[in-house]
Image: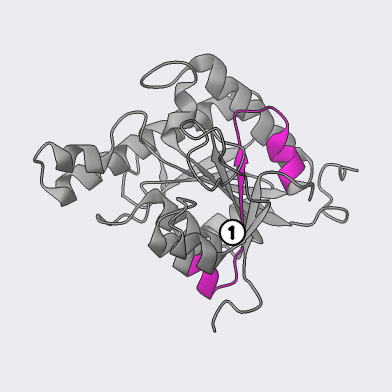
Amino acid sequence: MIAKTGSTSTLPYKRVLLKLSGEVLMGGSGYGIEPETINRLARELIEVRKSGVELAIVIGGGNIFRGMMGTASGMDRASADYMGMMATVMNAIALQDAIERQGEPVRVVSALHVKEVAEPYIRRRSIRHLEKGRIVIFAAGTGNPYFTTDTAASLRAMEIQANVVLKGTKVDGVYTADPMRDPEAMRYDTLTFTEALNRQLGVMDATALSLCRDNQMPIIVFDVTTQGQMLKAVSGESVGTLVKEGENEYV
């Protein structure tokens, strides 16, 4: 049963941090932002928020520019990463617009100072936005080169005291191998952080996973392209793969 708007009494998570890759916004296109896709995503985010969950989002920029792409072509790594951060700001503004057009309050908070279009990241202010029922979109990663948006998602989750990190992907969980290439690949229902790290399963990068493990922050990896999966995840239904601390995690 889903809680009524403004109530979290029947929900397992009071506050969640959703990590979205920029590629999710492409839909069926090969680049940029597909209007139908971002509008559908906005509707689902609003539905999650109205279930009673305080919702924060970290968004990537891979649909526009990836720092590693620039580095591979010979760019300075720091310069390429800053370009990638700016791409996340563009995605955040687009998502903000899609959510606002459907009548839900939302704030874009940036780790880089772009005050004309986004608020600067201030931890206490961001938490206050969440407490007031606003969706908060964190842009520009950590604001530092050499760190991924996965790491930014883990860091922001700790800072806002989220109960769980939801990682929305195009695959319905974590597999033993790439399910698109290996038809015999098996999906994990649950994993420990150490298993995910040791087997290099691509849940998140090693820095992000280690940060979640050290702070006992569970991660749910699910298919964000399938309608309704996000709401099921925050409602406590078994969706995708749950990555959590194991009994012998630190042995």
Q: Residues within 10 Å of mark 1 (few under 14, many from 20)?
A: some
Percent of width and height locating residue 135: 61, 43
Percent of width and height locating residue 165: 59, 54
- Which residue of the protein is positioned furthest toward the bottom in this rendering? 251
| Residue at (24% x, 43% y) in the render | 68
Residue numbers of the magenta segment: 211-233
The C terminus lies in which quarter of the figure? bottom right
Vertically, is 203 above or below 206? above
| Residue at (49% x, 20% y) in the render | 27
| Residue at (61% x, 36% y) in the render | 223
Of residues 114 and 199, the one drawn nearer to the viewer in this rendering: 199
Of residues 200 and 144, the one drawn nearer to the viewer in this rendering: 200
Q: Is residue 121 in sight in this rendering? A: no
Asked if residue 67 lies left or right of residue 190, the reply is left
Q: Image quarter for residue 32?
A: top left
Q: Per the image, is 223 magenta?
A: yes
Q: What element does badge 1 sit on?
A: helix
Q: Is residue 90 in sight in this rendering? A: yes
The N terminus lies in which quarter of the figure? top right
Residue type at mark 1?
Ile
Q: Per the image, is 62 magenta?
A: no
Percent of width and height locating residue 209: 47, 62
- Which residue of the protein is positioned furthest toward the front in this rendering? 184
Asked if residue 205 lies left or right of residue 225, the reply is left
| Residue at (25% x, 54% y) in the render | 145
Of residues 185 and 249, the one drawn nearer to the viewer in this rendering: 185
Vertically, is 228 above or below 137? above
Percent of width and height locating residue 12: 79, 57
Vertically, is 64 above or below 67? above
Of residues 12 and 243, the one drawn nearer to the viewer in this rendering: 243
Which residue matches tag 1?
Answer: 127
How many numbered marks does the figure carry?
Answer: 1
